[in-house]
Image (tube, coloured by chain):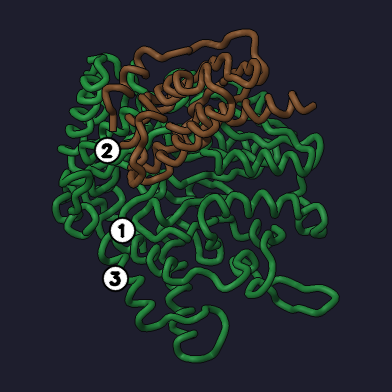
Chain colours: A brown, B green
């Protein structure tokens, strides 16, 4: 389950730290273990301009958020959402979903985590924060 | 009768383990199971499983209703279990209420107290309102914290709490300011489910008596592990759960002093708990029935009775002595590892076999995962004691909890497993 890619992202996380400016911020917590992430999102011209985050948690939750920033930054909101759907599908597949490396890149390393139901929430923590922040951004744009 | 002759012969752990089929299974690609999570739930021995099955195969019926033979036998089995369990904790059967679990037992008291405002003169002593205070501790399991927060919210009372020292003991220095004439309830854990600390019941009870407050003891982590006598401890209420003491889940126990249970209004109402029902209103059965609305769990009660027989046959003193050895070995073994910090008292004085720790540079989840890959089942997270972890400045811990069926060699496997986790994450 602990692929080298996961450990690399854990030890050297990408995009970590909270940055300005941002359109929306989301705080997510895993109530079963207390892991936390605060994630900020900046969307410019329909594209994810920046994802910044702080958090405390296990290697899985921290590495998965690091991978998230790689996968969504610079992409359109639509592309980011479809990448998120692919990652969520992989994580909820109990190890039966074959990940598409073209879509998920380093995210494929989490395929093994999907076999451990207790850890799936860890892997999704940052992604849930991203989803929530994105929803808040759209609300603000609409408002 | 409770065994009074202290049997000091060390436990024959191999013989005990033979009674627990699950302990001989393997996990994670053939690793022998090292089960160190009994603080979350314990495993059940064959005599408990057999008792449940025998009851269901021969006597199953709804208790306290029906006049047929099975109903009689089921009622006898249910009430017989109650008598045994009551005796095990120094109570009489009428003082022992069966609940779904210990959490429900605490909620029962908290809700009965907010029902007291409209329950007549008998219930007056349970009324809580503005100006009153409920005192808990910072080391409580959420089950002995949230119901009191909610009671305060419903009634306008104020929640106060004892802090915890750096060594994981209750800080009693402010006891005279915390437990005062305003205090209605003092609720605390007998043994912390994280720190392993055994709290000074006598000191807290004496202070509560001085000011006329009621005492509720969360005995979930004590009754399974050493001899506990609620009458001698002089507490007003106490709770514990079946599944942490070799018995089925789905059964918990509320102990209450007889005169309190008689005066306290019910929480859940309906069938079984009534005396007389008219369309205009109802009167209630005497305790414990007053607090057992609906058809109760039965095979679970029988199973808990069998668990008490099992523990009595071994002797709680021997169980406690064995766990003391396990705790000592675990504390010594873990303390020797650089980068490992015990969260809780560092020695075995007034301390049970619950050992929580953190490993520098390895998140508890990750440590737990490495241990799991070695077949070692521990718990990771905040163990339903989030405020305690926050007060220690840590988000989570790894927790190993031991019971009578654990071998000393399993402690060594835990210690080696922690070293392995350090190596894996490059912090050794």
**Most distant residue in the bottom direction:** B68
Q: Image check: B207 left or right of B193?
A: right
Asked if residue A111 is positioned above or below residue B100 in the image, the reply reads above
CB atoms of marks 1 and 3 within 8 Å: no
Asked if residue B427 is positioned above or below residue B264 in the image, the reply reads above
For the residue pair B91 and B405, the one nearer the viewer reads as B405
Q: Position of residue B164 (x, y in %)?
A: 51, 24
The residues bearing labels 3 and 2 have C-alpha atoms spaced at a distance of 30 Å
Q: Chain of mark 3?
A: B
Q: Position of residue B378 (x, y in %)?
A: 32, 38
Query: Tag on residue B372?
Result: 2
Q: Are marks 1 and 3 on the same chain?
A: yes
Q: Position of residue A116 (x, y in %)?
A: 35, 41
Crowding near pointer 1: few (<14 within 10 Å), some, many (20+)? Answer: many
Query: Tag on residue B44?
Result: 1
Q: Can you tell which quarter of the image residue B309 is in?
A: bottom left
For the residue pair B228 and B157, the one nearer the viewer reads as B157
Query: Tag on residue B50?
Result: 3
Q: Residue at x 50, y 22 (%)?
A: A72
Crowding near pointer 3: few (<14 within 10 Å), some, many (20+)? Answer: few
For the residue pair B257 and B149, the one nearer the viewer reads as B149
Mark 1 or mark 3, earlier in chain: 1
Q: Position of residue B97 (x, y in %)?
A: 55, 62
Count the marks: how many? 3
Q: Residue at x 71, y 71 (%)?
A: B284
Asked if residue B374 is positioned above or below residue B22 in the image, the reply reads above
The residues bearing labels 2 and 1 have C-alpha atoms spaced at a distance of 21 Å
Location of the N terminus of chain B by quadrant is: bottom left
Image depth: mark 2 or mark 1 in front: 2
């Amino acid at each position: 389950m602990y692929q080298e890619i996961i450990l690399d992202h854990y030890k050297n996380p990408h995009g970590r730290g909270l940055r300005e400016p941002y359109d929306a911020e989301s705080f997510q917590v895993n109530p079963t273990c207390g892991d936390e992430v605060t994630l900020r999102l900046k969307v410019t011209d329909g594209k994810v301009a920046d994802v910044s985050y702080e958090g405390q948690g296990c290697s899985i939750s921290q590495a998965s958020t690091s991978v998230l920033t790689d996968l969504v930054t610079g992409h359109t909101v639509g592309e980011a959402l479809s990448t998120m759907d692919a990652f969520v599908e992989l994580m909820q597949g109990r190890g039966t979903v074959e990940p598409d490396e073209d879509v998920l890149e380093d995210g494929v390393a989490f395929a093994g985590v999907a076999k451990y139901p207790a850890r799936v929430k860890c892997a999704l923590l940052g992604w849930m924060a991203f989803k929530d922040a994105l929803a808040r951004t759209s609300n603000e744009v609409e408002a | 009768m409770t065994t009074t002759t202290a049997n000091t012969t060390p436990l024959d752990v191999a013989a005990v383990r033979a009674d627990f089929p699950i302990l001989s299974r393997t996990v994670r690609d053939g690793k022998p199971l090292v089960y160190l999570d009994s603080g979350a739930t314990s495993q059940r021995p064959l005599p408990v499983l057999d008792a449940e099955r025998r009851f269901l195969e021969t006597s199953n019926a709804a208790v306290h209703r029906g006049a047929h033979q099975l109903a009689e036998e089921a009622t006898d089995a249910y009430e017989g279990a109650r008598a045994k369990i009551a005796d095990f904790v120094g109570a009489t059967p009428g003082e022992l209420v069966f609940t779904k679990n210990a959490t429900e037992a605490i909620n029962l008291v908290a809700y009965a107290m907010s029902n007291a405002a409209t329950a007549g003169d008998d219930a007056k002593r349970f009324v809580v309102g503005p100006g009153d205070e409920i005192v808990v501790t910072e080391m409580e399991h959420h089950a002995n914290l949230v119901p009191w927060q909610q009671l305060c919210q419903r009634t306008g009372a104020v929640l106060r709490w004892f802090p915890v020292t750096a060594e994981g003991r209750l800080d009693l220095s402010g006891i005279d300011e915390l437990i005062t004439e305003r205090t209605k309830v003092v609720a605390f854990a007998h043994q912390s489910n994280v720190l392993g600390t055994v709290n000074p019941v006598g000191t807290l009870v004496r202070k509560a008596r001085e000011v006329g407050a009621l005492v509720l003891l969360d005995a979930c982590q004590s009754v399974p592990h050493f001899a506990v006598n609620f009458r001698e401890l002089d507490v007003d209420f106490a709770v514990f759960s079946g599944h942490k003491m070799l018995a089925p889940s789905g059964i918990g126990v509320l102990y209450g002093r007889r005169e309190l249970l008689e005066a306290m209004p019910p929480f859940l109402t309906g069938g079984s708990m009534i005396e007389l029902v008219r369309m205009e209103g109802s009167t209630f059965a005497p305790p414990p029935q007053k607090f057992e609305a609906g058809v109760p769990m039965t095979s679970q009660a029988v199973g808990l009775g069998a668990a008490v027989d099992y523990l009595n046959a071994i002797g709680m003193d021997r169980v406690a002595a064995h766990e003391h050895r396990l705790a000592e070995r675990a504390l010594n073994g873990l303390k020797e590892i650089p980068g490992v910090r015990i969260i809780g008292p560092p020695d075995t004085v007034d301390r049970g076999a619950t050992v929580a720790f953190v490993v520098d540079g390895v998140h508890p989840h990750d440590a737990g995962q490495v241990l799991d890959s070695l077949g070692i089942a521990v718990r990771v997270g905040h163990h339903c004691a989030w405020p305690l972890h926050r007060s220690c400045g840590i988000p989570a811990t790894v927790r190993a909890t031991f019971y009578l069926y654990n071998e000393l060699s399993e402690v060594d496997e835990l210690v080696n497993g922690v070293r392995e986790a350090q190596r894996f994450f490059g912090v050794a």
